[in-house]
Amino acid sequence: MTKSLEDYLEEIHVLIQDRGSARVRDVALALHVKMPSVVKAISELKKLGLASQEPYGNIELTAEGARVAAQVLGRHTRIKAFLVKLGVSEANAEKDACLMEHILSAETMERMQEFLDTKKKAGKKT
């Protein structure tokens, strides 16, 4: 799956969590793209078995789509938390996490999580 499709999947997941539904217009606004781009991405996600949509209706994620989206969102959240711990501003951490979530290896992600867990434990002791 491409970086772009992962971004669409993640945004649909976030919209469903936040608003209870995701529509083409909402995704377009959130990702700053045109609605035909969203329609094309939804078509690709449907082919991959990750999403469904009735004509002009809400976008739904399949069980597999929700699993993959949650995985991508989790990577994003961990990377952003790691960068913030390093002292990166929230705004830059958000932008960088969006880029990095697609390319980091599983090993790197595991080490980041271990680092965050260690910092969290150390913070509780003080």
Image (tube, rainbow, N blue to C red):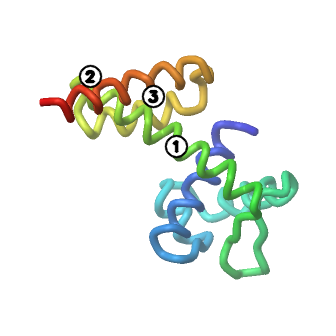
Give the label, 3 or 1, closer to the camera: 3
Q: Residue at x 39, y 36 (%)?
A: 95
User: SS class of the residue under badge 2?
Assistant: loop
Residue 101 in the image: above or below residue 28: above
Q: Residue furthest right?
A: 47
Residue 53 in the image: above or below residue 93: below
User: Is residue 31 or residue 75 the one in the foreground?
Assistant: 75
Q: Residue at x 28, y 26 (%)?
A: 119
Residue 74, which numbered label?
A: 1
Image quadrant assignment for residue 52: bottom right
Residue 27 in the image: above or below residue 108: below
The residue at which mark 3 appears reads as: 113
Residue 24 in the image: above or below residue 118: below
The tag earlier along the polypeptide, 2 or 3, is 2
Q: Is residue 81 left or right of residue 60?
A: left
Task: Name the residue type under label 2.
Answer: Leu
